[in-house]
Image (spheres, grey):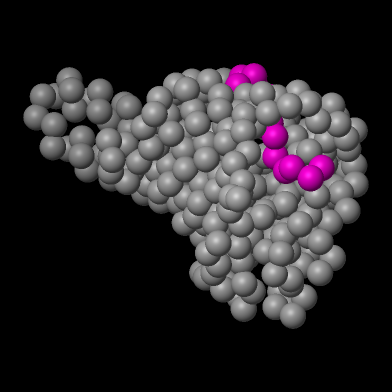
């Protein structure tokens, strides 16, 4: 499920190498060197026995191969530029993009290894038994009652954003589990810029699982990318937990698993936050910190109110806020 704040910042950039983030990436990599030195030998070497570390290494290898492929493709385009100086500039830019891409691949690796140090080295292979799931989603921190629409608003770098998170009466069966379908629509300055279907289900213990999403980002009414789209059980993709049944400070877990496509992590920081948004003031809120290796410089704090759900998302680096302004319920 894409973050409210980064839906138009494109969390899952799918190797969009042309943004200049070299300064930040250098800092991440510097910190990563210290981190990797402190990881256990098995977590760093990953000779086939350590699933999490090996996953990190293979993802980096795939990322680097993709960067090299993009570079070769760019050079092919440069070869068709007639003017010598313009052709040289094209080649120089292609090389700069390659170096930026390689740094990004390494920064993604560091984020994954950081997660491995918290998650452990066991394979991520959750057992999904349809008999262990219930029809309703009433987790206090993430209730999804069909016919309810949550409205979020906030000023983003791209413009004023309005997010309509509508819990529909539709369901979808994924891995044998009947999932509630949520229609998430994002409008930037009044124009639809993202249209997503998300699928959730709750197990008997009360954990809310995220089984996938079908997401379209749009510009001028046309789909520009479907990056982040995944469905548990397809192409090795697996569900994750969006909200635990009994959250505890220090929890750290996967919210989804689609390697190099959708890899959000969440960590529980607090259960006692007091938060005021346009929809009201709320006590005893859960504060969650969310990260992803697909955008190494992203760090978000999300706040969940008991009986309501998500009420606020804050980009820690920019301070941008997306807050709950209204809840619409069917009669």
Left or right for 277, reference 156: right
Residue beneath the point at 80% across and 50% down: 140
* Closest to the observer, 71 or 269: 269
Please report the residue visible at 56 percent of the width from the left and 28 percent of the height from the top: 153
Where residue 136 appears, as percent x and y from the top left, is: 71, 64
Count of residue discs: 0
Specify the farthest residue to the front: 331
Residue 282, magenta (yes or no): no
Would residue 318 be seen by someone viewing this image from the given angle? yes
State which quadrant residue 85 falls in.
Answer: top left
Coordinates of residue 90 in the picture (x, y in percent): 25, 28
Q: Is residue 149 left or right of residue 215?
A: right
What residue range appears in magenta? 306-320
Identify the residue at image location x=13%, y=37%: 80
Please tell me which residue lies in front, 325 or 260. 325
Q: Is residue 138 left or right of residue 12?
A: right
Residue 296 image offset from top left, x and y in percent: 61, 35
């Amino acid at each position: 499920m894409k973050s409210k704040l980064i839906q138009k910042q494109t969390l899952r950039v799918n190797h969009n190498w042309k943004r200049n983030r070299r300064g930040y990436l250098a800092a991440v990599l510097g910190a990563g060197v210290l981190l990797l030195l402190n990881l256990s030998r098995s977590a760093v070497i990953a000779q086939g026995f350590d699933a999490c570390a090996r996953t990190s290494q293979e993802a980096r290898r795939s990322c680097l191969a993709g960067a090299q492929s993009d570079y070769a493709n760019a050079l092919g385009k440069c070869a068709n530029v007639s003017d010598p100086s313009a052709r040289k500039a094209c080649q120089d830019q292609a090389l700069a993009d390659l170096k930026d891409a390689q740094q990004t691949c390494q920064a993604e690796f560091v984020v994954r290894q950081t997660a491995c140090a918290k998650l452990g080295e066991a394979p991520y292979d959750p057992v999904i038994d349809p008999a262990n799931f219930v029809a309703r989603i009433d987790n206090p921190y993430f209730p999804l009652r069909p016919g309810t629409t949550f409205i979020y608003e906030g000023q983003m770098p791209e413009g004023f954003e309005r997010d309509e998170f509508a819990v529909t009466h539709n369901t979808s069966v994924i891995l044998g589990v009947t999932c509630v379908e949520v229609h998430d629509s994002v409008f930037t300055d009044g124009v639809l810029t993202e249209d997503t279907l998300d699928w959730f289900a709750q197990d008997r213990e009360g954990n809310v699982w995220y089984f996938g999403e079908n997401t379209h980002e749009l510009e001028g009414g046309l789909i520009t990318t479907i990056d982040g789209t995944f469905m548990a059980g397809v192409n090795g993709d697996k569900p994750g937990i969006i909200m635990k049944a009994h959250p505890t400070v220090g929890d750290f877990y996967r919210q989804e698993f689609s390697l190099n496509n959708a890899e959000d992590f969440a960590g529980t920081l607090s259960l006692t936050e007091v938060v005021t948004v346009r929809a009201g003031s709320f006590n005893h809120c859960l504060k969650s910190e969310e990260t992803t290796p697909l955008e190494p410089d992203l760090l978000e704090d999300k706040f969940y109110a008991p009986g309501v759900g998500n009420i606020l998302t804050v980009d820690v680096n920019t301070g941008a806020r997306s807050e709950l302004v209204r809840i619409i319920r069917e009669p």
